[in-house]
Image (tube, helix red, strand yellow):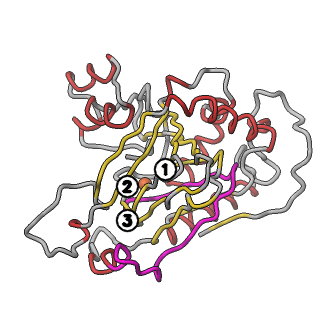
Amino acid sequence: MLRTTDTTDSTTEPTTDAENTGAVIDLDRHPIAGDDAARRELVARCRTSLADDGCVVLDGFVRADALARMADEGRQVAGDAHFNETITNCYSSDDDPTLSADHPRRIFMERTNGFVAADRLSSDLTVRRLYHDDALRRFVADCTGANVLHEYGDPFGHLVFNVVRPGCQHPWHFDNNDFVVTVLTQRAEAGGVFEYCPGIRSRDEENTDAIGAVLAGDRSPIRELDLQPGSLQIFLGRDSLHRVTRVEGDRERHVLILGYSREPDQIAGVDRTRRLFGRVSDAHRRADANGHSLEAVGTSTGGERS
Ligand SMILES: [Fe+2]
């Protein structure tokens, strides 16, 4: 995994207008804008890391002053999170009693996850300035090999705060979206650690023995990320089993999830939206009715985690 810990002096004041990319993103450390050699080299390293490891973390991506505002914004809206408590297996599928009792599909774990929908995040927030940044979107597209990325068209899901309360966890699972882009804005006091098993399965090999071993306690394939607030993480979770360990202490863990899609105007359906946010909008109902929702057309986005 690529993890940049460049120690370039990041105290330089932004020299551009506050609306610019550089007001939120530390371009001295992470030259994501423009089209110069430094950017090309950064993109190449990120692509290699995603291919090898399914993960990239860019430490210190968000400038300290912008991060302080984003963390504040997360705390302000966290009370609006909808919490979803379930018992789930790593595939988010039903049980299959025809399989042996130790098959991964038969191992169910407790999951409690909270999501604050995008319509709770007003247009003047710093999290929005980060999300709507064109240079960032182009950078993510280049890193993930997408020709073009669009802002995810879902009115709730395009920009989301994930809130994990003390005592809660997001257990071992695979994602069903292409990639996830996140910024940790508030760490837990303890626990709340992102752990993953790079490429434990593939399109050709489900590798249930290795997956079952991890669920039973084998830590040998596990990598642990000590994510720092302000780091940008791009993660490919389809084939890498991953989890957020139980949050300990008194402080919630807050992660901003930036949703992108390969096609414009994509939107989730009613069922998924209700499960994640506890409510739906007319736009979600219309998308289902017209057969345009992601569920209806059988695709996915680099959006909110399910
Ligand atoms: Fe995930």
The residue sitting at 58% across, 46% down in the picture is 252
Which residue corresponds to mark 3?
A: 239
Question: In the rendered view, does 88 fall on the left or right side of 17?
Answer: left
Percent from the top left, x then y, of residue 106? 21, 66
**Would the CB of label 1 be found within 8 Å of ligand 1?**
yes
Q: Nearer the viewer, residue 248 or 304?
A: 248
The span picked out in magenta is 213-238
Residue 158 in the image: above or below residue 246: above
Picture disc at residue 175? 2
Query: What is the secondary structure assignment of the residue under circle 2?
Result: loop
Q: Is residue 86 above or below residue 280?
A: below
Q: Give left or right: position of 60 versus 43.
A: right
Q: Amino acid at mark 2?
A: Asp
State yes or no: residue 204 in magenta: no
First-in-chain label (2 vs 3):
2
Does the residue at mark 2 contact the one at mark 3 (Cβ under 8 Å)?
no
Q: Is mark 2 within 8 Å of ligand 1?
A: yes
**Please, is residue 157 above or below residue 239 in the view?**
above
Q: Position of residue 209 (x, y in %)?
A: 28, 80
Cβ atoms at labels 1 and 2 below 8 Å apart: yes
Q: SS of the residue at dot 1?
A: strand
Residue 226 highlighted magenta (yes or no):
yes
Determine the CA span between mark 2 and mark 3.
8 Å
- For label 3, the SS is loop
Residue that sits furthest to the left in the current view: 98
Work out whether 235 lies above or below 259: below
Q: Nearer the viewer, residue 202 or 244?
A: 244
Residue at 44% of width from left, 45% of height from top? 302
Q: Amino acid at mark 1?
A: Val
- Dominant secondary-structure state across the stretch colored magenta: loop
Q: Earlier in the sequence, mark 1 or mark 3?
A: 1
Q: Quadrant of ligand 1?
A: bottom left
